[in-house]
Image: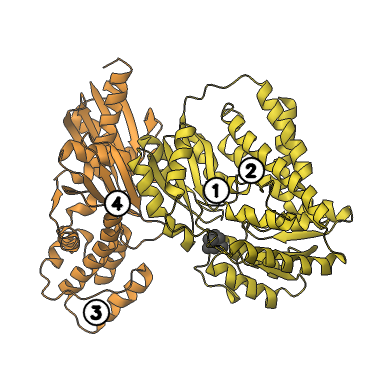
């Protein structure tokens, strides 16, 4: 049976179709989040890629910031629960998961069965989130997806002392005007995010293996900065961005099984 | 059922509009004294023939207060001082401010200079209540409060009046304890928000009056068939759990509150004033000596974590929500100890920021939903 999971974030919409809660049949990522046509596009794209229609879907679960706005999903689950499930599916040995989302950052502690044991979330502040990175990329006039590879060329990362996005922005501007190398600035920005998120990870307790989920995990610069900050290696699965949607599709399958329909 | 709803609505109206309660008592020719949190000796006010009324913050914009408090002072004190500065407490004959944390200490002095028309009566609790001299010290503090109250009333409170007040307060506390237990058999009627309203409402009533309302509510509840609640049960800990929007999100995810360790709620009622121990004032001071398991009471070895485990187990709660009052240092210090003890006992813990203000609750919703899914 096919189930669908959709993760409607603040800046992107990711959908996954799975068979019997085990095999990923199709996936789609659209860089438009809640309140846009992004979720609909992601939905249509994933069905097309899976070569199925809406009728073939046995159950759907929505997650993410816009989880309440999805009318075809039987239920919604928090993105933390879904990321825990999704990462456990992708990396069964992971016990600590760092998820840097568009407008928040989370650290999850998961049990051997993929169950969520504890979590920490940053609150009402853009520092240490994807939004912070976006703002900084704009100041550097660099595409967000290029920030990672750029920062890898750094020789002497600069120090960004302000955690507040607005002040950090002016700090970056002043670094630029003092002719600091752009790669060093990018690495400094990643360090600043990593410091903030590492503090949260220490609070939850960084049990190995440590993994990253969410789209920001594709930024190698952030992963490296976090590894240095936490003094541990971090596992990143190529499907890390889909972890939430995978968790949701798995939850939909579990519900069907519990109801005895599967 | 109709009656209980009527009684509950009365209490909700009082919590919604405390000003109306103030005007009601002023209209009766009574004097009203504002009592800052927490453990303010309101019995002394009551026995002096006045009405003590709790001041526990509000959802209000902070403007004037910015001249006196930094942005990182807790929301309760921000709001109380703001309302004082704006003249919203007009009608109060005085306020009593305890000095249980650094913020209190600043606010008491700010008030003295900035809110000139409402006299401020300070009271200092000996936070190390195990210390031998602590009761003597507190008795002398209460005497000084009484001296200041007598300036307002023009007469001195008698021991006999305080004896009577103590009986009224102890009866009220017993009723509140009974309500908390009875409510657990009726979690369909006593939702988290309603439970909070009932527990908080006593601050705006003369206690004998509130006791009468509570007797009706308890009786009505007992007459109703027990409800078989199938959702998840939690306890709350912290200073306050407000605004009610947060409690409504708990209900939305089928979470019931079956016990609390909130300073604003059960802490008010959980320790009775001892029957014996000397004069009435001394007995009142001895009540403080019996307090423990609170961030505002010094303990060499904190018992709060164990007390929370006991509370959760006795009420079959699977989780505890630690309602972290924003910028409240005493509570921040207690959190790691409580969380560790609770988790070791297999009880899930959620730390939830409380800033008392209206606004977006999306972050709180995600946290609560995640917690519900974890339980
Ligand atoms: S104890 Fe906490 S909530 Fe109470 S006044 Fe002090 S900082 Fe504020």
Residue of label 2:
B199
For the residues beneath circles 3 and 1, the answer to whether they share a chain is no
Tag 2 and tag 3, C-beta contact below 8 Å: no
Mark 3 nearby-residue class (10 Å; few <14, some 14–19, many ≥20): some
Q: Pick the residue in front: A169 or B134.
A: B134
Give the mark, 3 or 4, whose residue is nearer the N terminus.
3
Apparent side of residue A74 relative to residue B127 in the rendered image (left or right):
left
Residue of label 4:
A204
For the residues beneath circles 4 and 2, the answer to whether they share a chain is no
For the residues beneath circles 1 and 4, the answer to whether they share a chain is no
Residue B39 makes an appearance in the image = yes
Mark 2 nearby-residue class (10 Å; few <14, some 14–19, many ≥20): many
Instruction: Say which residue appears at 39% left-offset and 40% top-offset.
Output: B371
Residue of label 1:
B262
Q: Which mark is residue A176?
A: 3
Report the Cα–Cα distance between label 2 and label 3: 57 Å
Report the Cα–Cα distance between label 1 and label 4: 25 Å
Q: Is mark 2 within 8 Å of ligand 1?
A: no
Q: Is mark 3 within 8 Å of ligand 1?
A: no
Report the Cα–Cα distance between label 1 and label 2: 10 Å
Chain B tint as drawn: yellow
């Amino acid at each position: 049976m096919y189930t669908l999971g959709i993760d409607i974030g603040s800046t992107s919409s990711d959908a996954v179709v799975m068979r019997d809660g085990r095999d990923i049949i199709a996936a789609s990522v659209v860089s438009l989040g809640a309140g846009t046509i992004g979720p609909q596009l992601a939905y249509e794209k994933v069905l097309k890629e899976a070569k199925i229609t809406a009728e073939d879907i046995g159950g759907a679960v929505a997650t993410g910031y816009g989880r309440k706005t999805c009318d075809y999903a039987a239920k919604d689950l928090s993105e933390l629960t879904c990321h825990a499930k999704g990462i456990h599916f992708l990396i069964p040995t992971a016990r600590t998961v760092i998820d840097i989302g568009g407008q928040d950052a989370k650290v999850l502690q998961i049990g051997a069965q993929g169950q969520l044991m504890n979590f920490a979330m940053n609150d009402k502040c853009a520092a240490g989130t994807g939004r912070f990175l976006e703002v900084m990329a704009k100041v550097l006039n660099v595409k967000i997806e290029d920030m990672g590879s750029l920062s890898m060329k750094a020789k002497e990362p600069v120090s960004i002392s302000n955690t507040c996005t607005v002040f950090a922005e002016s700090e970056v501007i002043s670094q630029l005007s003092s002719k600091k190398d752009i790669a060093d600035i990018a690495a400094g920005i990643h360090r600043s995010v990593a410091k903030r998120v590492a503090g949260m990870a220490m609070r939850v307790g960084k049990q190995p293996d440590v993994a990253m989920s969410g789209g920001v995990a594709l930024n190698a610069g952030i992963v490296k900065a976090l590894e240095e900050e936490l003094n541990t290696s971090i596992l990143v699965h190529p499907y890390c961005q889909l972890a939430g949607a995978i968790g949701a599709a798995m939850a939909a399958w579990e519900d069907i099984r519990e109801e005895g329909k599967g | 059922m109709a009656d209980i709803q009527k009684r509950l609505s009365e209490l909700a109206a009082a919590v919604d509009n405390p000003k109306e309660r103030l005007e009601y008592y002023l209209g009766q020719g009574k004097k009203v004294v504002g009592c800052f949190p927490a453990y303010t000796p309101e019995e002394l006010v009551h026995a002096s023939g006045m009405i003590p009324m709790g001041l526990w913050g509000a959802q209000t914009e902070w403007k004037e207060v910015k001249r006196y408090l930094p942005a990182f002072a807790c929301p309760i004190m921000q709001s109380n001082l703001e309302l004082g500065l704006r003249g919203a407490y007009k009608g109060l004959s005085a306020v009593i401010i305890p000095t249980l944390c650094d913020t209190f200490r600043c606010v008491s002095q700010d008030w003295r200079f900035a809110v000139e028309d409402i006299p401020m009566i300070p009271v200092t609790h000996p936070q190390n209540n195990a210390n031998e001299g602590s009761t003597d010290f507190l008795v002398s503090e209460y005497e000084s409060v009484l001296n200041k109250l007598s300036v307002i009333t023009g007469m001195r409170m008698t021991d006999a009046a305080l004896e009577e007040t103590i009986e009224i307060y102890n009866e009220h506390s017993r009723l509140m304890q009974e309500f908390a237990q009875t409510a657990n058999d009726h979690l369909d009627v006593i939702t988290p928000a309603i439970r909070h309203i009932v527990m908080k409402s006593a601050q705006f009533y003369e206690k004998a009056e509130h006791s009468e309302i509570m007797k009706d509510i308890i009786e009505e509840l007992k007459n109703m068939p027990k409800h078989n609640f199938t959702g998840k049960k939690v306890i709350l800990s912290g200073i306050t759990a407000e605004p009610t929007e947060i409690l409504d999100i708990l209900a939305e995810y089928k979470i019931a509150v079956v016990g609390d360790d909130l300073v604003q709620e059960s802490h008010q009622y959980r320790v009775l004033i001892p029957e014996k121990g000397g004069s009435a004032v001394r007995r009142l001071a001895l009540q403080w000596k019996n307090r423990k398991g609170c961030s505002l009471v010094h303990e060499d070895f904190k018992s709060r974590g164990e007390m929370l485990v006991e509370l959760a187990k006795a009420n079959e709660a699977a989780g505890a929500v630690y309602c972290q009052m924003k910028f409240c240092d005493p509570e921040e210090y207690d959190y790691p100890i409580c969380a560790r003890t609770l988790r070791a006992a297999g009880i899930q813990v959620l730390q939830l920021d409380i800033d008392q203000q209206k606004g977006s609750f999306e972050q709180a919703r995600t946290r609560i939903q995640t917690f519900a899914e974890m339980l």
